[in-house]
Image (cartoon, rainbow, N blue to C red):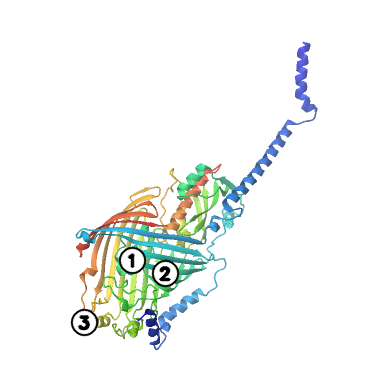
Amino acid sequence: MTRDSTHVRAWAGTTSCPLFSHLRLTALLLLLLIAAQPPAAGAKGVYQAPEDFVKEVFDGEVPPPQTLWLTQDIAQGAEKILGHPLRLLRVHYWAKGSRSAWILEETGKEQPITTGIVIDGGKVAQMRVLIYRENRGDEVRQPFFLDQFKGTGLTPDNELDRHIDGVSGATLSTRALTKLARLALFLNQQRHGSP
Amino acid sequence: MNKKAGLITMILGVGLLPLAAGADPVDDLRKTVESQQQTIDSLKQQMDATANLIENGGLERSAASATPDTVVGGYGEINYNHYTDDSSRDMMDLRRFVLSVAHRFSDRLFFNGEIEWEHAIASAEDQGETEIEQAYLSYSLRPELTLTAGLFLMPFGFLNESHEPPNFYGVERNFVETLIIPSTWREGGVQLRGTTAVGIAWEAGVTTGFDIAHFDDASAPLAASHQELQMAKARDLSVYGALNYRGVPGLTVGSAVFTGNAAQGNADYTADNSLPDFAGADARVTLWDLHARWQPGLWDLQTVYARGSIGDAAQIDQVLQTYNAANGTALPYVPEAFYGWYGQVAYVLWRHENMSFAPFVRYEKYDAQSRMPAGFSADAANADRVTTVGFSFKPHPQVVVKADYQTFQDNSGNDRYDLGIGYQF
């Protein structure tokens, strides 16, 4: 007896449709009801547009963007931090006084995570996930995780000077954000006039 | 004197000639600087345009939009086991080779799929398997709410959802999360998943369940009766829910529960009355777990407790006993309850750039037949207390070399050394 005919005969043998058992139907309808709410406008994993982040960092008085050209030394340093080449010729940033803002991206598991990082006095002052594109692991965008980076600096080996506790089930996203913090600190050191 | 005067006059004359002609050297210098600044600005614009061309093909694109919509990944492991009491059981095996595909249809809609090959060769004559481990569509209703439909992993324990070799300690997957929680456990259905700003993640779904008529291995009650969406009987669907708290970095505490009938309308007997007749049985399968993980600094502490039950086990086993006696078969008997738990401690002892070395120790206790119906006895081989001591060496965060030694307190003939390599990309 083939599996197909087994399936057909099993269905024909029932006297009531099993799909409509109380508990499962209620659960299914509840799920669909919650899901049927109209999607939130702009709900595409974009938590803040990069330009809005920069505006917020500089209280609306955004300095003109500057360019850090990736010389060989800088490119090599960036590659060591990321574990792969940084395929850019230059990085844009905004700076006023001792404060600089960077918009950087690194792939978590499959998709890049766009992150805004503020460096002040050679330390991370603020870190925010601007666009999160992965399916899972978005706990890493929450303040309870990102606040760990505040006040971190760079060791002579270009490692963070403090341990960052990860989020279980989001190891690759955690690693990506840690790399971005290191990269921002490193690039800030390379720019002319950085503290 | 006249010559001297003439020379001085000439020098003064040459020097003062521009002044006499109305020229201003400071003004000239200013004009030269301005001209050079214009040249520099022009060169900067040309450099920016050139860099744009090289980086983005002349378009203003971020690295994100340059990321392909389809991403291929995978993981795999090759393991070696040496049994200290009986080397004829020694084995080296390509345990699994998995390819995954993730496709982004839009910023909200994703597809994820995984295909797995086990034991190198899958054919009618070989023991390998080819299976689809995951195949689901995921839609982001809002950043903190995702709807998923298809074949997806169940959120129990840690290993079931995070089973790539670099992500767990031990060459072999632990017994609690293979024999009690049937990793890699997946069901077909619909799932809603949400996260909150305080670190609570929740999940609920309606899915296919188990088929008690397929029960064929007393050592792993749920692995013996899972359907894996292979023409899965869906007369009896199941529901599940999971809750996890990750609001403190490095800490995860959670629980999950799954329940649903597994009798599937006695479909096999209805189709073929030479098979056991489970009429009147619902065979409700329920599994719940508690899990916690804490990773302070370089430490990694983890524990899982899982417990399951199968309803109407007495009735089902009576039928099987009668059937075995009448047909000369040895179909295994269904337990009423089964459970397992483990505690594990690991520590990253050494790190250098991307490399790390972490020893670990794990103690686990499991019993796949912790309660049998009256008149039916458990097989001692289906319960044990296992201690595993070993290490993971990572030459890269996504590549691991593992070694460990496992002692089985109740079935010491299974004591073994294990070696393994694994990767994920």
Q: Residue at x 38, y 82 (%)?
A: A5
In this rendering, which labeled residue sits more in front, label 3 or label 1? 1
> Pointers 3 and 2 in contact (CB under 8 A)?
no
Q: x%, y% of residue A172? A: 43, 57
Amino acid at circle 1: Gly
Most foreground residue, B281 or B256: B281
Chain of the residue where label 2 is placed in the rendered structure: B
Graded by Cα atoms within 10 Å as few (under 14), some (14 to 19) or many (20 or more), the crowding at tag 2 reads many
Graded by Cα atoms within 10 Å as few (under 14), some (14 to 19) or many (20 or more), the crowding at tag 3 reads few
Amino acid at circle 3: Ala
> Pointers 3 and 1 in contact (CB under 8 A)?
no
In the image, residue A30 sits, relative to residue B365, either above or below, namely: below
Graded by Cα atoms within 10 Å as few (under 14), some (14 to 19) or many (20 or more), the crowding at tag 1 reads some
In-image side of B69 versus B354 (left or right): right
Element at label 3: helix
What residue sits right under mark 1 in the picture?
A: B128
Q: x%, y% of residue B165? A: 36, 59
Q: x%, y% of residue B220? A: 29, 71
| The disc label shown at residue B325, or none | 3
Element at label 1: loop
In this rendering, which labeled residue sits more in front, label 3 or label 2? 3
Alpha-carbon span between mark 2 and mark 1: 22 Å
Task: Tell me which numbered mark, 3 or 2, is placed earlier along the sequence.
Answer: 2
Residue farthest toward the front in the current orientation of the protein? B125
* The image quarter in which residue A166 lies: bottom left
Q: Residue at x 24, y 82 (%)?
A: B323
Amino acid at circle 2: Phe
| The disc label shown at residue B152, or none | 2
Chain of the residue where label 3 is placed in the rendered structure: B
Chain of the residue where label 1 is placed in the rendered structure: B
Q: Is residue A121 visible?
A: no
